[in-house]
Every structure is written in structure tokens, then in C-alpha cells.
Image (cartoon, rainbow, N blue to C red):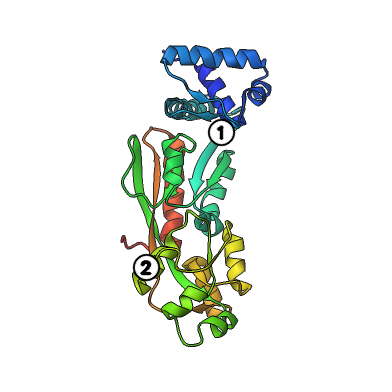
């Protein structure tokens, strides 16, 4: 049987990034934190932490953290039900989400729900191709991801499809694409991408223009709002989700460089396969919003 006091200490060290900060969070001495971690490592028979700056969990530590957070979520739910008139500390729910969803349909879907139940939202933003790793490591109870296959111990539900248009301003088009969207022009015109993890632009150029990886210049803007603004400010062309792009195309602010062509990205909601009311209610809210905002034909 695991000692959950020691597991709580492990979670505090990882979340705080070190033993000293964890001690302040737990209101105990640093040596007491170290002792609890040592007892847990002796019980498991493996090292659970990499003593770096900041401290990071080992693979065994990640598995224990995931278990602890699942139990904590269930206990929080039980506590709310048993003490409906005095729920005490609000439940915090960590969710991993991609920036484009966060900037458009995601928050309107969940904000009323979290306000109603008094939950606290902890959002972790990453590329949609990587958010499932945060679920796997136990950093989040659910994630919006492009990974359809459910991970071990998780369920996967289709949400919808984000359609990405290749767009630029009319001034940018006149400057770089006066003779059309040719391979030569694309190799010279600066693109705007979200981050070094983002491979969507590479796949677009490879699929439609047979261009090699790194065959183009790029600005990197790791913010969905900043990314779009960089395109609107004539810095480059880029792939923008339809929820943001369509209105600007209709207004004449942006031009669709490849009408009828683009990139479709299917999004899924993956969550821990535990009987927690929180994740069930969250999925229902996300699914309802996704039906209104995203394409519903699976790809």
C-alpha cells in the first residue's frame, strides 16, 4: 500500500520544481520532504526524481504521479459530493490543449461549466501532436490531441476537424506571389509558423508543391494571437484555422492563396479511463461546442 503523504510530497516537488519550494507549499521542512521522497523510493525500489534544476520525474516517478493525480481527482469529486454545502478547496483540473483551439472554440465551451461547479482550470498549451504526452505523463487529466488511438488506460473521442487555409495579406501577395503560388516564390517568401514542433506547414508544402523540409524561410511566433497578427501585419504567409481565417478572408484582410486546398487536422479528446464525473461532463461540453465550430466528417 502506497503512502499518499509521500506521494503528495513527490507531486509537490515536481510541481514546484524543487525541494525547497515544495517544503514551503507543504508547510514542512526541506529535510522532511527529502525523507518522504526517500521513503517512497525505498518502497518502490527505484529512483523517482532526477535531481536537476528544475527537478524532473523519472519514468517511474511519472507513473506514480499519474496514479496520484487520478486518485486526487476522484477524492476531490467524492469530497464535493459529501460536503455539498461546504466543498472546501476547489477542484483543480489540468487540461492540455493546442493553441488554435484555445484561441477560438475551447474556452467558450468550458468557461460556463467551470464557473458553475467552481472548478479551477489549469491549462497546458502545446502543439496538438504533443499534448497526448502530457496526458501520458500524468500532467493533465485530458487533452485535445491529433492522436486518435487511445493510450493505455485512456479513452479517445472524436471532436471534429480544424480546416487550415493558406493565407496572406493582399500586399504580401502583390510583393511575393504576383506570378502565382510557385515553388520558386514559396522558397523566397517568408512563412509564419507556430513553433519548431509545428510540422503542418512542412506537410502542406510537401503535399501540394513537393518542396523539401527546410526549403523555405520562416518566422516563428509561438502564440496563436501573435501568429495571426504577424500574418495580418504582412510579415509572412501561413496556415490559419478556419475559425480565424474565414472572417478575415471575407473582410478582405487576408487572401486564400490556395482556394479549395488546405490542411485538415482531426482533433480528439483523450482522457483518463477512470469513473470521474469531471471528465465526463467536460467531454460533453467540448463535444457540443465542437459540433458547432468544427467540421464533423472524420478524415
Residue 112 higher or lower than 54, as above or below = below
**Residue nearer the viewer, 43 or 236:** 236
Cβ–Cβ below 8 Å for labels 1 and 2? Answer: no
Q: Position of residue 154 (x, y in %)?
A: 35, 38
Q: Is residue 48 left or right of residue 121?
A: left
Residue 69 higher or lower than 254, as above or below = above
**Residue nearer the viewer, 156 or 109:** 156
Which element type, helix, strand or loop, lies under badge 2?
Answer: helix
Q: Position of residue 60 (x, y in %)?
A: 42, 25
Q: Is residue 50 left or right of residue 291?
A: right
Give the residue number, with chain letter if any, for mark 1. 91
Quadrant that contains the C terminus:
bottom left
Q: Residue 113: in sight, yes or no?
A: yes
Residue 297 higher or lower than 146, as above or below = below
Q: Residue furthest bottom?
A: 179
Instruction: Name the disc covering residue 206, or none.
Output: 2
- At 54% from the left edge and 26% from the top edge, which residue is drawn? 11
**Residue nearer the viewer, 162 or 13:** 13
The CA span between labels 1 and 2 is 45 Å
Q: Position of residue 124 (x, y in %)?
A: 54, 44
- At 60% from the left edge and 61% from the top edge, which residue is drawn? 225
The local crowd at label 1, few if under 14, some if 14 to 19, many if 20 or more residues have their Cα within 10 Å, is many
Number of numbered discs on residues = 2
Q: Residue 263: in sight, yes or no?
A: no
The local crowd at label 2, few if under 14, some if 14 to 19, many if 20 or more residues have their Cα within 10 Å, is some
Amino acid at each position: 500500500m502506497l503512502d499518499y503523504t509521500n506521494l503528495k510530497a513527490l507531486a509537490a516537488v515536481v510541481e514546484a520544481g524543487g525541494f525547497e519550494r515544495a517544503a514551503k507549499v507543504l508547510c514542512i521542512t526541506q529535510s522532511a520532504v527529502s525523507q518522504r521522497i526517500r521513503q517512497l523510493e525505498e518502497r518502490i525500489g527505484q529512483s523517482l526524481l532526477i535531481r536537476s534544476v528544475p527537478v524532473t520525474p523519472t519514468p517511474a516517478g511519472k507513473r506514480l504521479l499519474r496514479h496520484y493525480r487520478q486518485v486526487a481527482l476522484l477524492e476531490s469529486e467524492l469530497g464535493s459530493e459529501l460536503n455539498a454545502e461546504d466543498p472546501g478547496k476547489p477542484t483543480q483540473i489540468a487540461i492540455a490543449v493546442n493553441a488554435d483551439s484555445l484561441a477560438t472554440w475551447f474556452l467558450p465551451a468550458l468557461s460556463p461549466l467551470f464557473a458553475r461547479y467552481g472548478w479551477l482550470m489549469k491549462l497546458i498549451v502545446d502543439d496538438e501532436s504533443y499534448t497526448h504526452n502530457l496526458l501520458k505523463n500524468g500532467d493533465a487529466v485530458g487533452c485535445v490531441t491529433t492522436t486518435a488511438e487511445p493510450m493505455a488506460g485512456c479513452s479517445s473521442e472524436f471532436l471534429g476537424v480544424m480546416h487550415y487555409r493558406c493565407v496572406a495579406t493582399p500586399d504580401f501577395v502583390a510583393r511575393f506571389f504576383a506570378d502565382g503560388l510557385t515553388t520558386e516564390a514559396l522558397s523566397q517568401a517568408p512563412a509564419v509558423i507556430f513553433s519548431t514542433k509545428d510540422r503542418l506547414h512542412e506537410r502542406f508544402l510537401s503535399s501540394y508543391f513537393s518542396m523539401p523540409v527546410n526549403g523555405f524561410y520562416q518566422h516563428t511566433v509561438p502564440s496563436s494571437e501573435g501568429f495571426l497578427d504577424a500574418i495580418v501585419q504582412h510579415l509572412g504567409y501561413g496556415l490559419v484555422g478556419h475559425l480565424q481565417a474565414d472572417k478575415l478572408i471575407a473582410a478582405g484582410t487576408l487572401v486564400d492563396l490556395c482556394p479549395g486546398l488546405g490542411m485538415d487536422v482531426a482533433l480528439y479528446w483523450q482522457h483518463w479511463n477512470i469513473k470521474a464525473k469531471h471528465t465526463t461532463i467536460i467531454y460533453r461540453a467540448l463535444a457540443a461546442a465542437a459540433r458547432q465550430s468544427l467540421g464533423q466528417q472524420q478524415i
